[in-house]
Amino acid sequence: VEEEVKSSMISFLAKLSGQQSFSTLNWKADSDPCKDLWHGVACDSRNVSVRRIFLDRLDLHGTLDVAILCSSQPLADSLMILSLAGNNVSGGVADEVGNCKQLTRLYLGRNQLSGELPSSLAMLNNLKWLDLSNNKFSGNLPGLSRISGLNVFLAQNNNLSGVIPGFDFSNLYKFNVSFNNFNGRIPDVHGRFSEDSFLGNPELCDQPLQKNCPIQNLDQKTEESNGSKGPSKDQILMYSGYAVLGLVIILFVLYKLCTRKKTQKAEASSKVASSSDHDVFEKPINGSSSEQKSVISRSEISVNSESGMVSQSLIVLKQPVAVNELRLEDLLRAPAEMLGRGKYGSLYKVKLDNGKTVVVKRIKALATSSHDFKLKMETLGQVKHPNVLSPLAFYCSNQEKLLVYEFQENGSLFKLLHGESKGFDWSSRLGIAASIADGLAFMHQEVGENGIAHGNLKSSNILLSYNMEARISEYGLMNMDDDQLSLSSASPHRPLGSGLPNALKEDVYGFGVILLELLTGKLVKNDGIDLAEWVQSVVREEWTGEVFDKELISDYASEERLVNLLRVAIKCVHRSQEARPSMNQVALMVNTIKEEEERSLIYDV
Ligand SMILES: Nc1ncnc2c1ncn2[C@@H]1O[C@H](COP(=O)(O)OP(=O)(O)OP(=O)(O)O)[C@@H](O)[C@H]1O
């Protein structure tokens, strides 16, 4: 390591701690930070440049002088992680932090830091994780909207004020500015964060806080955008005149519309009375009359004659605000969009009158009787695991079976891995793997006598909620008569002569494949090559390093933990069902790796 880097680091620590820490931390001027293992320092594989400095929870009482580190060009060009979390460090963040362009993680939480945050923070294009929480920072937050790869932003419990600037929320999965003095309208967080992220700021308003912005706030906005101090009396009179005229026109149009609708309704009900079709949801008929066309353009699923009689038969299993007192007519009336046709039937996204969005699965003909279907759905409705998406409601008649689910804003794991978005980092992948494993282990063990198998586990059935929590969807759709059939599509390796395939062990196989997708970033079937087969052949040839997703390598994911997770995946996709671990064992192994990762980020390197 260059002398300049070494002396910058020593001066940095001197300010942070005073001389006494040097010997305990082994930071000695006549030694090398990389080769002589300075405490908390991690270097590149050639031991020539410093990549990470972790000085967490060392009871450091001095001042932060980030300018010393970031003014040394070679250090600024190599430093990726700086962590001082959980000390008693005071001082502020200097402008020079903007020179440390390689920083991906900056952990300053739980200190006594104060002053304004420099606008140069916005220059840190590579930042993924910024933790400023539990300090005494004040003033405005700099605009960080250019940092598109930011995954985590934590600034809770400070004295920050002003309006919350725009962020690029597309990759953010943790965001917290609670308990500050922010004011004004909350930017559109696209439903990703709940009110917990904003609480404790008395002057903040709008969603997701249950607090409307005062009119005056809106006026201010218009004034600001007009650049004037406000309308004159004449202008007010003129605008009120326009408003009254507008209102009269709107009322007239509404009156006309209502009278027309009434006539149409009367016509429609006379047609319906003569209909003999008994499906509840029907595919749009290629329109002939203009009336049919208008129904189709509102919704891909349309109502027919039976809707009136079945209104009480929609069984609501959970009672969140979204489906409170939901009736079948509401579902049928609402605009819907087809999301896809899966193994078990078609899926529609439905926007309810109350503004909430749900997803309706119209199940293809099932061999299961209505009675068994009801029983199964009611059991599933009782399942309360945060990582399993259980139905909100269902409808069941001899002709039709519908399931209603909460809409998951962030799509599927499949899309996240193989779609266009970038920056799906290692700790997020590990977190998602652990959540799926927990959900599956719970279902395999705790529900019913022998547990409930999923039967169709794959990355498109792992959905991500508004705050990027993983939820296993389509649970329990594998019906009893269908078990054999659905199993035939799971693992390509049927156990030879070993009796009935065990559906739970097939889920373990499915989970192993998801782990492989997370580790390699590759599709399950790529040019006809099976992912599990490919990984096993590469590992047999001892080219293990080749299998990992390049994005993970450049994220400096620990090779040891990558390999450990790969080992778990390979156990799960073992040819023999008996040799595969139980989901409970798998969950334990994955969680151990996740905990090691979390510890490494905080304590050691
Ligand atoms: N509750 C939901 N919220 C948001 N998106 C969903 C929801 N359920 C499913 N999806 C997404 O809608 C798309 C279509 O789903 P569908 O279940 O019809 O097919 P699939 O999952 O691809 O196939 P299969 O039924 O065989 O599992 C998928 O991309 C899926 O990830």
Image: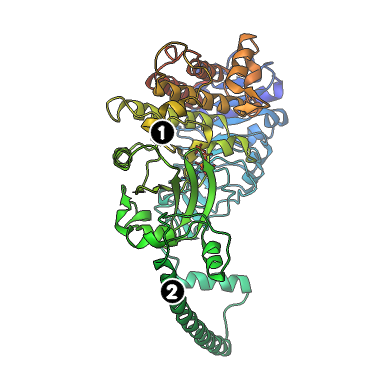
Q: Secondary structure at mark 2?
A: helix
Q: Amino acid at mark 1?
A: Met
Are the residues flagged by discs 2 and 1 in contact, CB closer than 8 Å?
A: no
Task: Give the quarter of the image for residue 9.
Answer: top right
Q: Nearer the viewer, mark 2 or mark 1?
A: 2
| Residue 478: assigned label | 1
Give the camera-side residue of 385 and 572. 572
- Residue under label 2, please give it: 265
Horizontal and vertical percent for residue 383? 32, 37
| Callout 2 crowding tier (Cα within 10 Å): few <14, some 14–19, many ≥20 | few
Locate the N terminus and report the quarter of the image it occupies.
Answer: top right
Locate the C terminus and report the quarter of the image it occupies.
Answer: top right
Task: Write the residue at 62% across / 30% down.
Answer: 80
* 479 relative position to 84: left or right: left
What separation in Å lies between label 2 and label 1 (alpha carbons)? 41 Å
| Callout 1 crowding tier (Cα within 10 Å): few <14, some 14–19, many ≥20 | many
